[in-house]
Amino acid sequence: MLEIGLTGGIGSGKSRVADLFAERGAALIDTDLIAHEITAPGGAAIPALVEAFGPTCLRADGAMDRDAMRALVFSDPTAKARLEAITHPLIREVTEQRAARIRAGGAHPYLIHVVPLLVESGRWRERVDRVLVVDCSEATQITRVMARNGFSREQVEAIMARQATRAQRLAVADDVIDNDGPVEALPPQVETLDRRYRAMQPASRTPPRAEHP
Ligand code: ADP
């Protein structure tokens, strides 16, 4: 099954584009959603987080305290690596379980992984057959995220400064969706790519799966 990594900067329109692909029958796996699930109350990452960072890394309801962890990561350079050493393998595991189930189900023509930090992570580029970038100008990103999240311009710029640049994303893109214009410009672009993806075969580097030795 062809697997595509969909990425783009904050506010570029990844969620909107992903929804349009889902409407056309694509299977979706959202890594951000998985990251939230494993750090929710009772989530798979919780025991290891408490062991590594102590009970203060949790909120009263037992979920990871995102604000506290964000502050810790800012003040302690090793904390980010320790946090990711716990969460990334679990995200990978859940991703692979879901991908296997989708492949076995046979109900979808292709699979789209929504990965906000795909370009920042070398592993993802090798994992997928194609990289699809949702692109818009930085000014558009700022306007959208200020409106969506109620953030100040400075807050949005601080988030963007920690992400890959527009040029870095475009440099690794196999396909690009231009989302600087109105939302009405998206469906025709998605339709074109949907047709192309349905006709494509996954790269032969995909290792043979256990069930098909
Ligand atoms: P991402 O998932 O990349 O952060 P979203 O899909 O959530 O981005 O889009 C960011 C915000 O901008 C949302 O509020 C969304 O409804 C809005 N949006 C997305 N595309 C457009 C567009 N072409 N025109 C106007 N608003 C848009």
Image (tube, rainbow, N blue to C red):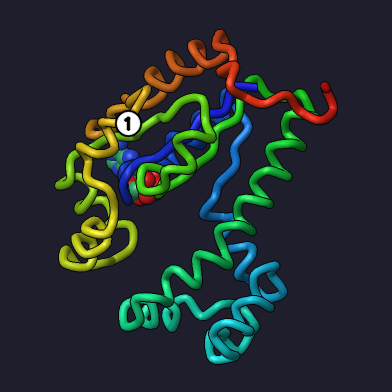
Q: Nearer the viewer, residue 156 or 69?
A: 69
Q: Nearer the viewer, residue 74 or 136?
A: 74
Quadrant containing the C terminus in the rendered view: top right
Residue 177 in the image: x percent, y percent?
A: 33, 27
The residue tagged with tag 1: helix, strand or loop? Answer: helix
> x%, y% of residue 41?
67, 75
Tell me what residue is drawn at x 53 percent, y 35 percent. 127
Q: Is residue 98 left or right of residue 91?
A: right
Relative to 81, is 183 on the left or the right? Answer: left
- Residue at figure coordinates x 26%, y 31% from the top left: 171
Q: Residues within 10 Å of mark 1 (few under 14, many from 20)?
A: some
Quadrant of the drawing holding the N terminus: top right
**176 vs 165, nearest the viewer:** 165
Identify whether 160 is placed above or below 138.
below
Position of 191 compared to 33: left or right? left
- Depicted 72 relative to depicted 103: above or below: below
Would you say 185 lies left or right of 165 here?
right
For ligand 1, give the image quadrant: top left
Q: Position of residue 92 (x, y in %)?
A: 61, 50
What's the amino acid at mark 1? Answer: Val
Residue holding disc 1: 172
The location of residue 124, given as percent across then percent down, is 48, 40
Q: Quadrant of residue 6?
A: top left
Q: Residue at x 55, y 46 (%)?
A: 30
Q: Which residue is nearer to you in this view: 160 or 73?
A: 73
